[in-house]
Structures are given as structure tokens and as C-alpha cells.
Image (cartoon, grey):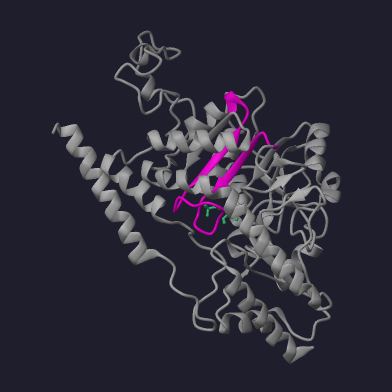
Amino acid sequence: MSDDARILKLKGEILAKVGEYYRLAHQDRPFVPGTSFVNYGGRVYDEAELQSAVDAILDFWLTDGPRAADFSASLAQYLGLAHVLTVNSGSSANLVALTTLRSRQLDCPLEPGDEVITPAATFPTTVAPIVQNGLVPVFVDCKLGTYNIDVDLLESAVSERTRVIFVPHILGNPVEMDVVTSFAATHNLYVVEDTCDALGSTFDGIPCGAFGDLSTFSFYPAHHITTGEGGAVGTNSAKLHHIAHAIRDWGRDCWCDHQSTAGGECKRRFDWEIPGLNEPYDHRYYFTEIGYNLKMTDIQAAIGIPQLAKLPEFAWTRKRNFQVLYNDLKAYEEVLVLPSWSPKADPAWFAFTIAVRETAPFTRQDLNTYLREHKVETRYLFAGNILHQPGYRDIQHRIATPLVETNRVLKSALFIGTYPGIDEARLDYVLQVFQDFMAQWI
Ligand SMILES: Cc1ncc(COP(=O)(O)O)c(C=O)c1O
């Protein structure tokens, strides 16, 4: 037997053992109501992800490699985008996206002090890269129920420094992108979509993440698919993609991929001309951007490939779980604000958000404590109002209109899970816990 044949055989045996290991060590433990936790989110996987990761480890590529290229190509195809760049988190994706728009390679880059319209009810790393890039966030109120930016207020946020609208689809609920894109066209703004919570959601039949000049994704375990840590930046613009690629990779200009030989795919690696230097230079060390190193590893991408294949099923289950919760919890609308969404939206819900009405006989704290005591995991809605967070209190910013609804989110909202790890038994249990809680108060 040749060495190649032995390697292949050995690999097959190892991967079969990994499958066996998965079934013994990882497969779901039975759900015991009242004892097992009903998490709000988490990894949902089978032996395919474990085998794919081990396969990548046996190849030992380790850094950004062929699997990252496959994963980004599949994701681009799913979204109908020309380019997807893998990165090491959704936060890095947001940083890359905003930094890209500051590039001197653009005809009209963003300048320090330029304004970015965004909601104040948000995840912190949507605001962080605005501040890190010397830009000024202009906060717009949200709508209780959708928890998204209130698109009716966009006009009130515009000034002569406005250059970008940066919208997160909060908890999987699509923002009204028809309004956002026509508003952006009127005022000549870049659109950046934070799609970290909304992979699999659509608006007017178009995937969230396919509307913006740039869009960002997260593959943290609670999200629609996971690579452990991980994220991506999508765009239809070859130029923006090229700049984003450089910012992700230390700021270097070279675009040759992992298969590059010493000469690079372009075949002129060592013949590159740097302006002002009278001799050729190595394109691999030719830096056009002030960059970072935010790459995804091949092992992470290996996990992402089978996860992406499961996305339609995951999205379907999230929608089913949401609907079951919604149908039942509707009975408590007098005391709870239930989620709402645009008729054009088909959300693959990240979670089920509830706001406790001011007129309710109990507080959010009462409900939260009860749910947690009964093993139903909860979260508050990210930063609530970002300006109330100590790290953000002193940032330079502008407030378009009073953040009335945002402050209601801060004080009254929480969410529970819709993720595919929640099956019918868990849903029944969660609804029973709500019923028992409500019986004490109404
Ligand atoms: C809307 C939003 N943007 C960005 C992020 C950051 O993603 P990551 O945790 O991968 O950095 C999150 C995280 O959950 C998010 O919900």
C-alpha cells in the first residue's frame, strides 16, 4: 500500500472514531423539566462538524486556508453576494466594514467627524468601530416590539456631515430595508447592515445582508450558524472587498490566496512597484491600509461548512419555535409587549423578545428572576441604551430625537431562546413556566 493510500485509510478510521465519540460524548442528554436548563442559544451540531474540524486539524493548515475560501464562497452564493470575506468575529466584521469606508483608496472616504446614523438600542460593537474610526454616531430611537431603528425618524437625524447609515437587524428581525436604501440614495449615504443576528432572515424575499454596500455576520455559538468565534464581511463591490481584505490582513495589498506559490498568483510578487522607490518590492509586504490581523482559521471554517448546509433547517426551526411561543404568549398581551415585524419581513428569529408593560402588576425583574429560577435562560436586550453603558457615556455623539422607546427597552425588555436546540418538550416547559408565573399575578 502506498503512503497516500495508508494516510487516506488512517484518516477514514480516525473520522469514523470521531463519529462514534460524538454519539457517545456529545449527543443530546434527555431533557428533564425543571432540572435541565432551557438555554437561549448554543451550538447545534452533529458528528459532521466534529469530523470536519478533525479533518482540518489532520491537514494542519491552521491559518486562513482552503476551507475558509470554500466557506466564504458558499456563504456568498447563499446570500447572492459577489464577495464574502471571513473574519474572526462579528465585532471584527463591523470594525473591518467601517474602517474600509475610511480608506484613502476610495474617491471620497469618510473623514474624522463624519456622522453615522445608528440606533442606540444595540450591541456595543456596532457603535465601537464608529468611535474607533473617529466618526460620530448619531443615535436614533427604536420601536418597542420590533426593537429596530425607527425608520420614520431617519430624516430627523441627517446633517451635512452624515455619510453612513449602519443598521443592525436586531435579534433577527429585518429592518425595513426599502425605506433605508431609498433614504440612503436620497442623501448619498453608504449603507452598512449588521446582519450578525439575522443570517437566514429575508426582507421582501431578499436575504438580510444583501442590501448594504457592506454587511457583517457573526458565527458566535448563539448565532444562526457557528464556527465558535467567527464572522464575515459581505459586499458586491470588488473595490470594497479588496480594501476590506487588506484591512483584515495587516493592511497589505496582496490578494493572492493561500494557494500562492513563491511568485504569487499574480506571478509578479517580487516585481511590485512602490511609488517613490526605484526598484521592485515584495507585494506580500506592500501595505496600502492601516490594518489588523482578523482572519478566521481553517479549523473554524471547517466547522462553518457543515453548519451552513444546515442553515435552512435551523432557520425553519427558529421560525417554528417563535410561532409556538407567540401563539401562546399572545394571551398575556395586556401585560407583555410581544414582538412585531414588517409584513415584508420573514425573520429567522434569533430570540423571542418581551417587554413588560409599565401597567403590569409585576416588573421585568420579577419575570426574569422567576424564569431563571425555573431554568429558563434569559438575556436583557444587549446594551439597552448604549449611552447608559459606562464605556460609552462620554463618547462624542449626537441624539436625533429623544430616546424614549430605547429607554423603555433598557428598563423593560428581556429575551428567551428560539434556537434549534429548543424542541417541543422544551417549548411546552417554557410555556408552562410562563403560565405558572402569570397565575401568581393576573
Ligand atoms: C447585532 C450584533 N452585532 C455584532 C455582534 C458581535 O458579534 P461577535 O460576538 O461575533 O463579535 C453581535 C453579537 O452577538 C450582535 O448581536
Q: Which residues are magenta?
A: 211-240
Residue extending farthest left: 1
Task: Determine whether 222 is above or below 151 in the image.
Answer: below
- Please give the name of the residue rendered at 63% of the width and 29% of the height, measured from the top-left corner: 236
Q: Position of residue 113 (x, y in %)?
A: 68, 40
Front position in the image: 215 or 288: 215
State left or right for residue 357 relative to residue 368: right
Q: Is residue 212 visible?
A: yes
Q: Position of residue 114 (x, y in %)?
A: 69, 38
Q: Does the magenta portion include 337?
A: no
Q: Position of residue 45 (x, y in %)?
A: 45, 56
Which quadrant would the C terminus be assigned to in this image?
bottom right
Task: Determine whether 358 is above or below 44 in the image.
Answer: below
Task: Determine whether 15 is above or below 420 in the image.
Answer: above
Which quadrant would the N terminus be assigned to in this image?
top left
Residue extending farthest front: 1
- Please give the name of the residue rendered at 60% of the width and 70% of the height, measured from the top-left corner: 424
Q: Is residue 92 visible?
A: no
- Please give the name of the residue rendered at 28% of the width and 39% of the height, measured from the top-left corner: 59
Q: Position of residue 24 (x, y in %)?
A: 33, 66
Front position in the image: 201 or 21: 21
Q: How many marks?
A: 0
Front position in the image: 367 or 112: 367
Residue extending farthest top: 278
Q: Does the magenta portion include 214?
A: yes
Front position in the image: 115 or 37: 37
For residue 405, which quarter of the picture?
bottom right
